Amino acid sequence: MYTQLDIESHFDGKLKIAYLNQPDTMNALTKPSLSDLKDFVKECSEDPTIRCVAISGRGRAFCSGQNLDDAFVQGNDHHDDDIIRRIVTDYYNPLVLEITRCKKPVVALVNGPAVGAGAMLALICDFVLASNKAYFAQAFSNIGLIPDTGGTYFLPKLLGRQLANYLAFTGKKLSAEESKSYGLVAEVFSEEEFNSKSMEILEKTSNMPTVGLKLTKKAFAASYNNTLKEQLELEGDLQQEAAETEDFKEGVQAFLQKRKPEYKGK
């Protein structure tokens, strides 16, 4: 179904991992791979049996950013002045929106370099797990472009204006450990432990109360634009919605009975 992705299923289908699968180009993004990734995230969001989504890369890289041959050579008119706008509008923006509004947690498993749009593909996910062999670079300025893939929205919020400007202007590479110190990465593991440690976290996330996580994600997203009063009102509404789930009832019963809860994601 997905010609550009390698899909793995784990934990009885509760976890789906999509691997960018063009290792010869360090998993550079193309229009087909962007479309496949968007469709994959959307399908996972709507499938009630899936409770966690992850994105990673095959080979030694996570993603090297946009494949320039795909953008400018393969069947494209070199005199089309609007080609960049159309690629951003038609391929990148829909993917960003699918990831950020996905009803399930979306985790980036950054196994190696994440550059340009590849760095932002990781950073727009709900959290990032990285190998110590990974690095992140906002390389857009190296070819005269601006950060896209949500970069101009998320980077100042994640880093503050000064550091966002510095990284965007210079294209400086950040190691995985540096990225963690700046709050861009949740956990960094050794290359040898990356797969096993990441899977432990993904298994835990796949067994959490999924609706509650979805509502948390919704509340955090709204906080960027809400006043405190608006956010408090939203918290009340979403907390009531969470309290009406089967998982909330299970969590309370498990606490009272001093046992581990068994959440169903409902």
Image (cartoon, rainbow, N blue to C red):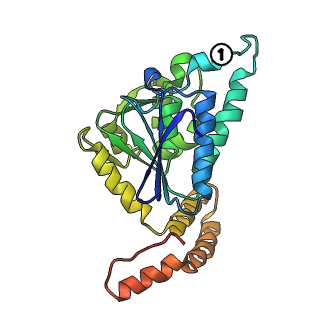
Would residue 148 be seen by someone viewing this image from the given angle? no
Examine the rendered structure and indicate whether residue 57 appears above or below residue 83: below
Q: Residue at x 61, y 67 (%)?
A: 231
Q: Residue at x 54, y 68 (%)?
A: 211
Q: Could you say which is closer to the camera, residue 97 or residue 75?
A: 75
Q: Residue at x 67, y 41 (%)?
A: 94
Would residue 57 be seen by someone viewing this image from the given angle? yes
Q: Quadrant of the N terminus?
A: top right
Q: Quadrant of the C terminus?
A: bottom right
Examine the rendered structure and indicate whether residue 190 appears above or below residue 126: above
| Image position, residue 132 (x, y; %) | 28, 37
Taking 207 as reference, is 218 left or right?
A: right
Taking 43 as reference, is 14 left or right?
A: left
Query: Given the current orientation, which residue lies at the most extreme top position?
Result: 78
For disc 1, the marked residue is 74
Examine the rendered structure and indicate whether residue 122 appears above or below residue 68: below
| Image position, residue 188 (x, y; %) | 30, 44
| Image position, residue 28 (x, y; %) | 51, 26
Examine the rendered structure and indicate whether residue 174 appears above or below residue 259: above
Quadrant of the rendered structure where residue 2 is?
top right
Label 1 sits on what residue type? Gln
| Image position, residue 244 (x, y; %) | 58, 80
Quadrant of the rendered structure where residue 217 is?
bottom right
Task: Count residues near mark 1 (Cα–Cα under 10 Å), then give few for <14, some for 14-19, many for 20+.
Answer: few
Local secondary structure at mark 1: loop
Count the marks: how many?
1
